[in-house]
Amino acid sequence: MSPDSTLNCGRSYCIISLFAIFIVTTLPGCSQTTPPESDAASPKVQIALNWYPETEHGGFIAADAEGYYKQQGLDVEILPGDTNAPSLVISELAAGRIEFAVSDADNIVKARANDVPVVAILAPLQNTPRCIMVHEESGITRLEDLANVELAISEGRPFAQYLMLKLPLKNVTRVPYNGLVGEFMTKKSFAQQAFVFSEPFLAKEQGASPRALMVSEIGFNPYASVLVTTEKNILENPERVQRVVNAAWRGWKSYLDAPEKTNEAIGKMNSNMSAGALQYGADTMKDLCHSADGEPEFGMTQKRWVTLVEQIEEIGSMEKGAVRAEECFNDSFLKKAAAEFGKL
């Protein structure tokens, strides 16, 4: 589900405060040089999700379900998110209460503009899942043709600001996005932001014929479901960071190849996700995870980060020069993971 809403996309969830569960503990006696599979106590590591557990977190959950964290000598706890999580995980990282979190590349850039030294270390979704959902009956087939509709959108988010800057939006009335598909179901002249593997499925289940217009088609395409840590953690615990990336890399490979076991685990963590919705999400997400030719799997390039920084500057969300693109990511851990496990 899109982590922009204050409600949960047509489902009733029990919201658990992240403040109550974000407690990072490192077991005594853990050494940074402890090798995987050693007899020493495994370091306790928490990875905070930026939303309720869903398919966009599949690889991180697969690493737990398949035992990859344990194989790396880690005791990992996945912390489910809620409606507050997209912004909260960044502040929790900044405060040092968690070591790892899941976020999106545009949030990382904005955090660094606010002097929060977070760093992307793995980018499973190479293409953003964000889309604008319209009715097929509307005849709208491109974002550039979006006209004569109500558009439910979170205007403060970078993708929305970029869309409003670049598109004519003729006779488009913008209304707040509430995370539900109910109004979409009752109005043919209604469009809304969505995640391509989420709201379109809900709309289809309820009898609509939605069409997803990808935001990436107008050039705004930040990495998504990014594994994030801090500069401090990289400096002080590089071996632990490497182990987490090793396991997460393998988890994403496993999830994309065979998601069934992990989808069962996600369903236990989030009982409001049906098996059908999870399978649809896993199938739809595969295309989003493909790297461009010549780019490393789940990797990142400075060119992509430079483009994103320039776009966030263009929409006025930060001052020009406030963020250096090369400081937003560190792909050295990913490259080592790919080299070690890529042939498995």
Image: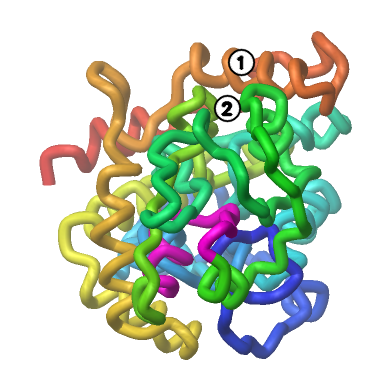
Residue depicted at x 61% and y 66%: 51
Residue 312 got which mark?
Answer: none
Q: Amino acid at mark 2?
A: Phe
Q: Position of residue 198 (x, y in %)?
A: 44, 65
Residue depicted at x 30% and y 30%: 291
- Rounded to the nearest angstrom, the CA distance separating label 2 from label 1 is 6 Å
Q: Which residue is mark 2?
A: 329
Q: 222 left or right of 98? A: left
Q: In which image quadrant can residue 44 be found?
A: bottom right
Residue nearest the observer in this picture, 157 or 235: 157
Is 201 within the magenta? Answer: yes
Q: Amino acid at mark 1?
A: Glu
Residue nearest the observer in this picture, 323 or 28: 323
Residue depicted at x 32% and y 38%: 337
Q: In which image quadrant can residue 203 be found?
A: bottom left
Q: Which residue is mark 1?
A: 326
Q: Position of residue 270 (x, y in %)?
A: 49, 83
Q: In which image quadrant can residue 140 be found?
A: top left
Residue nearest the observer in this picture, 146 or 268: 146
First to last magenta residue range: 188-203
Q: Position of residue 272 (x, y in %)?
A: 48, 87
Q: Position of residue 331 (x, y in %)?
A: 46, 27
Is 260 within the magenta? Answer: no
